[in-house]
């Protein structure tokens, strides 16, 4: 924990945070660590180890609106074990099944964080364990997880505010394609047709690019992509 906090304090970019989060995940012996923050203005910032395919699907399907982890933690102030959330609905159960199949894990522990100006963030640890083993893991590491969540949130906000584009996550080729066509003045239907993909898939690429760029909407994402040199016209 001392090493993790020290490395966080020395971090200058999102890539630094990503590397240290990966290291901390390995030390904990879990499958994934996820940090996701939304400012009061709607700007998003994330450091996560989930598979890219799962992230794309989660965004494309709008799963945040039915995710018991997100919805439950919005109403909580204390760290929450996923087992204590309401998974009784059919959509929730299906979501959990998809998440487990994607490698997220059947167990999770999330720390809700609230900051100035309406900021809300979640720091989540997840993995594949039996209930007995998971309960022992949480009992032994809950203090470290709570400290890590708040130290990471503090450093992430510093980096996001000081250099919102210089440390942006790299955009995929498809994300650059969709933003380029929008920057050239095409509407979504025209751009999707040009790329020979559905509008639904097109929207998922736009949304994932928006999150990576910390943009509040599609227009903002295009502007940031152009000004940051991600899209060349």
Image (tube, rainbow, N blue to C red):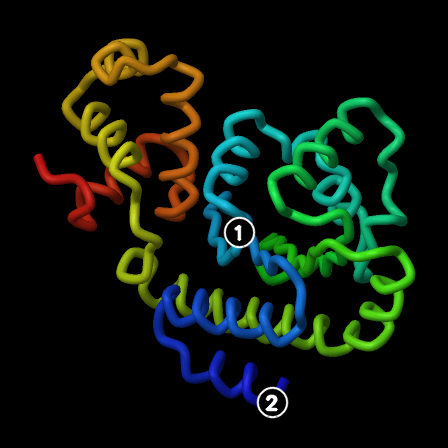
Foreground label between 1 and 2? 2
Q: Residue at x 32, y 38 (%)?
A: 221
In the depicted view, which residue is nearer to us: 154 or 107?
Answer: 107
Q: Nearer the viewer, residue 67 or 158?
A: 67
> Which one is in front, 216 or 83?
83
- Give the label on residue 39, or none: 1
Q: Position of residue 175 (x, y in %)?
A: 30, 35
- Tag 2 residue: 2
Furthest-left residue in view? 233
Q: Residue at x 51, y 87 (%)?
A: 6
Relative to 63, say whether 163 is above or below. below
Give how far across and how far down residue 106 sits, in percent: 76, 47
From this view, report whether residue 92 is shown above or below residue 152. Answer: above
Callout 1: helix, strand or loop?
A: loop
Q: Residues within 10 Å of mark 1 (few under 14, many from 20)?
A: some
| Corner quadrant of residue 140 | bottom right
Q: Relative to 35, is 205 above or below? A: above
Q: Quadrant of the N terminus?
A: bottom right
Question: Regarding mark 2 in the picture, which secondary structure is present there?
Answer: helix
């Amino acid at each position: 924990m001392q090493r993790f906090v020290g490395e966080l304090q020395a971090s200058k970019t999102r890539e630094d945070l990503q590397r240290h989060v990966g290291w901390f995940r390995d030390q904990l012996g879990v499958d994934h660590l996820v940090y996701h923050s939304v400012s009061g203005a709607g700007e998003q910032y994330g450091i996560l180890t989930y598979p890219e395919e799962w992230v794309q699907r989660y965004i494309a399907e709008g799963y945040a609106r039915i995710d018991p982890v997100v919805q439950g933690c919005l109403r909580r102030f204390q760290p929450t074990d996923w087992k204590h959330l309401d998974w009784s609905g059919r959509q929730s159960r299906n979501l959990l099944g998809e998440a487990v199949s994607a490698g997220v894990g059947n167990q999770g522990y999330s720390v809700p964080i609230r900051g100035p100006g309406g900021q809300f963030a979640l720091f989540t640890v997840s993995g594949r364990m039996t209930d007995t083993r998971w309960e022992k893991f949480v009992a032994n590491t809950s203090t470290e997880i709570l400290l890590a969540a708040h130290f990471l949130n503090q450093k992430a906000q510093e980096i996001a505010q000081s250099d919102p584009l210089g440390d942006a996550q790299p955009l995929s080729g498809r994300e650059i394609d969709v933003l380029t066509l929008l920057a050239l003045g095409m509407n979504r239907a025209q751009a999707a047709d040009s790329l020979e993909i559905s509008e639904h898939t097109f929207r998922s690429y736009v949304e994932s690019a928006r999150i990576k760029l910390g943009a509040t909407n599609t227009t903002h994402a295009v502007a940031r992509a152009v000004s940051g040199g991600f899209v060349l016209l």
